[in-house]
Image (cartoon, rainbow, N blue to C red):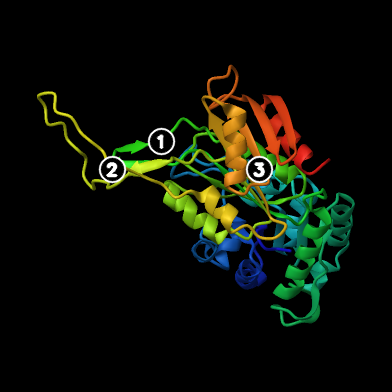
């Protein structure tokens, strides 16, 4: 359940902060991607460098960066959109009070207010503190506000007392996290389905500063990924060099060349649904110079020998698993339907989305498109915003 999920681990200033290191590792072993945010006092118990090294991400502590003014002060907004679950372990009485009363004086509490995901609080403190009337009231209010509370364990505490207040063991937090994510998972016709979507162009380099490519913006591929996610799919978006913003909620991997994408697809070839919306170059230079090619002057010419790039879609069609669905894209300048039908059959696809490059409101970079969806016994035409078309395509394919 945690594989591929995105978790923010919030660490507050209690002695149990050291246990959060082990919790981070266990989340990672379960397949989750973890980002860590700490209160300033938490860094007195465990250095932020420890969490940065283990999570392979920058650790967020302060909202404002004094060394680089203006940089990343909106990180709490982006992280809040990114996460599938926010776990605060340990959560001190001080931070619990701030959560309940909506205070946001550090990156952890600011990110919590911006979070769109479920939040699990693991209150951890000395026994007398935990059982105090104010903490009891705050825990009750936190539950009423919709936060999940994992009750602490009883045992030997840092104070030397044997009482309630210990941070639960990582396996208990992992188990509860998985249950919460399962309860909040988008339910739809593609729930539990692994879907790979490709988007954007490839670049085939002639030398370090020049390459063969195309104007693909990746907008159609991103729209397909978002539409599949809205139906409950577990999405991985493979994208080329694009400027189009990618929603943080999408899990992504980046490729540059067609060969890069081919290697990625070999790793993801068992996905139940593959949507190949990327504009992959058909040709690449037979050889690439490792130095910039200089002009020779006097009207000299340069000849570049080209060779075909891997036909990734054909390879997927040849390797297609039982019940796997392959959806291809085709952009043409002439004989659109005829060429698309040929590609559909030749590459053993289930569906193909075809559009005419020179049609008004269709093609590269724009927000609108006209798609002809072709299947073995189906032909439908959709026109409009790419986001709307993506939803209509999947609705037709999955008979929604």
Element class at badge 1: loop
Q: Quadrant of the C terminus?
A: top right
Element class at badge 2: loop
Determine contact: label 3, label 1, CB under 8 Å. Answer: no
- Give how far across and how far down residue 121 sits, in percent: 77, 60
- Disc with the residue nearer the chain's start (2 vs 1): 2
180 to 344, vertically: above or below: below
Residue 225 circle label: 3
Q: Nearer the viewer, residue 176 or 49?
A: 176
Determine contact: label 2, label 1, CB under 8 Å. Answer: no
- Disc with the residue nearer the chain's start (3 vs 2): 2
Residue 70 circle label: none
- The residue tagged 2 is 208
Q: Residue at x 58, y 28 (%)?
A: 336
- Disc with the residue nearer the chain's start (3 vs 1): 1
Q: Nearer the viewer, residue 396 or 93?
A: 396
Q: Residue at x 41, y 36 (%)?
A: 213
Left or right: where 44 falls relative to 154: left
- Mark 3: give few (<14), some (14-19) or many (20+) Cα within 10 Å: many
Tell me how many marks there are. Answer: 3
For the residues labelled 3 and 2, the Cα–Cα distance comes to 31 Å
């Amino acid at each position: 359940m945690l594989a591929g999920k995105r978790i923010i681990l919030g660490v507050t200033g209690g002695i149990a902060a050291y246990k959060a290191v082990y919790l981070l590792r266990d989340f990672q072993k379960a397949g989750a991607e973890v980002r860590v945010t700490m209160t300033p006092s938490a860094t007195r118990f465990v250095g932020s460098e420890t969490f940065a090294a283990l999570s392979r991400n920058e650790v967020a502590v302060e909202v404002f960066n004094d060394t680089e003014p203006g940089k990343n002060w909106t990180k709490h907004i982006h992280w809040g959109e990114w996460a599938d679950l926010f776990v605060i372990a340990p959560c001190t009485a001080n931070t619990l009070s701030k959560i309940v009363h909506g205070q946001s004086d550090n990156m952890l509490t600011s990110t919590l207010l911006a979070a769109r995901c479920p939040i699990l609080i693991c209150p951890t403190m000395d026994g007398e503190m935990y059982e105090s009337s104010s903490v009891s009231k705050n825990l009750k209010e936190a539950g009423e506000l919709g936060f999940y509370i994992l009750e602490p364990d009883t045992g030997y505490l840092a104070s030397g007392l044997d009482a309630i207040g210990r941070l639960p063991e990582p396996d208990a937090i992992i188990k509860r996290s998985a249950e919460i994510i399962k309860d909040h998972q988008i339910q739809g016709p593609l729930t539990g389905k692994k879907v790979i979507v490709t988007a954007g162009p490839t670049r085939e380099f002639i030398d370090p500063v020049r390459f063969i490519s195309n104007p693909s913006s990746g907008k159609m591929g991103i729209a397909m990924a978002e539409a599949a996610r809205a139906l409950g799919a577990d999405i991985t978006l493979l994208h080329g060099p694009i400027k189009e913003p990618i929603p943080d909620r999408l899990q992504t991997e980046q490729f540059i060349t067609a060969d890069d994408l081919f290697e990625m697809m070999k790793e993801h070839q068992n996905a139940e649904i593959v949507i190949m919306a990327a504009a992959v170059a058909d040709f690449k230079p037979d050889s690439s110079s490792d130095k910039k090619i200089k002009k020779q002057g006097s009207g000299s010419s340069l000849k570049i020998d080209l060779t075909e790039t891997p036909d990734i879609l054909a390879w997927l069609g040849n390797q297609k698993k039982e019940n796997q669905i392959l959806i291809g894209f085709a952009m043409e300048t002439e004989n659109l339907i005829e060429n698309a039908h040929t590609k559909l059959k030749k590459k053993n696809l289930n569906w193909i989305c075809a559009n005419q490059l020179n049609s008004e409101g269709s093609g590269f970079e724009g927000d609108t498109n006209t798609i002809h969806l072709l299947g073995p016994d189906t032909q439908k035409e959709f026109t409009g915003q790419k986001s709307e078309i993506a939803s209509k395509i999947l609705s037709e394919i999955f008979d929604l």
